[in-house]
Image: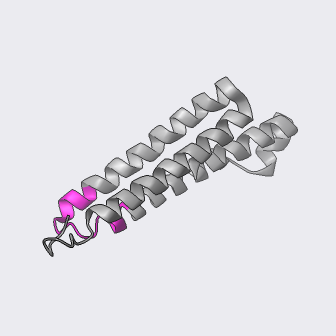
Amino acid sequence: MLTLAQIVVSLLRNHLETVAYQDAFPDPLFYGMFAALGLAAFFSWRRSHPIENVWQRGVIAVLAAVGALLIGFLGALADRVLGLAGLIGWGVAAAAFGIAGSRWAVRAFAPDPGTGGTG
């Protein structure tokens, strides 16, 4: 979400003057950051559902939110170094790693067919 907000800001910055871009959509980075933090915390809480300890699930949710912020900071670096193409590439790579990590987390809690327990 934060990378998508950064792409929107980059497009607005390139196509509109500063005053017009601020009038078109006030503070898209703030809303993108808020959405990214909320989504990261929500999905990490849902993915850690098999963990019974609420404290551990909360720590996982906070770490996911911090990770979302780090992804956004690295996206800003990609934007400054490589421009819009780098930001789009960074967004695709971040989404691919996120999907792979989510699948890994689901597989980690799947029952082990050999023992009948969890992995």
Q: Seen in the image, is 19 located left or right of residue 86?
A: right
The residue lying furthest to the front in this view is 114
Q: Seen in the image, is 83 located left or right of residue 78?
A: right
From what the image shows, is residue 112 above or below residue 78?
below
**Residue visible at 80% across and 47% down?**
23
The residue lying furthest to the bottom in this view is 116
What secondary structure predominates along the stretch shown in magenta?
Answer: helix
Could one spot residue 37 in this view of the protein? Answer: no
> Which quadrant of the figure has residue 18?
top right
| Residue 48 located within the stretch drawn in magenta | yes
Q: 59 and 51: which one is in front?
A: 51
> Which quadrant of the figure has residue 100?
bottom left
Q: 31 and 86: which one is in front?
A: 86
**Residue visible at 14% across and 72% down?**
117
Q: 82 and 8: which one is in front?
A: 82
Q: In the image, residue 99 lies at what x, y percent?
A: 48, 56
Q: In the image, residue 85 lies at what x, y percent?
A: 72, 36
The residue lying furthest to the top in this view is 81
Q: How is the image coloured?
A: one colour
Could one spot residue 57 in this view of the protein? Answer: yes
Q: In the image, residue 7 lies at what x, y percent?
A: 70, 44
**Residue visible at 36% across and 57% down?**
104
Report the magenta residues as a range: 44-58
From what the image shows, is residue 15 above or below residue 108?
above
Q: In the image, residue 92 lies at what x, y percent?
A: 61, 47
Q: Seen in the image, is 22 located left or right of residue 38?
A: right
Picture quarter with the C terminus: bottom left
Q: Seen in the image, is 18 located left or right of residue 41?
A: right
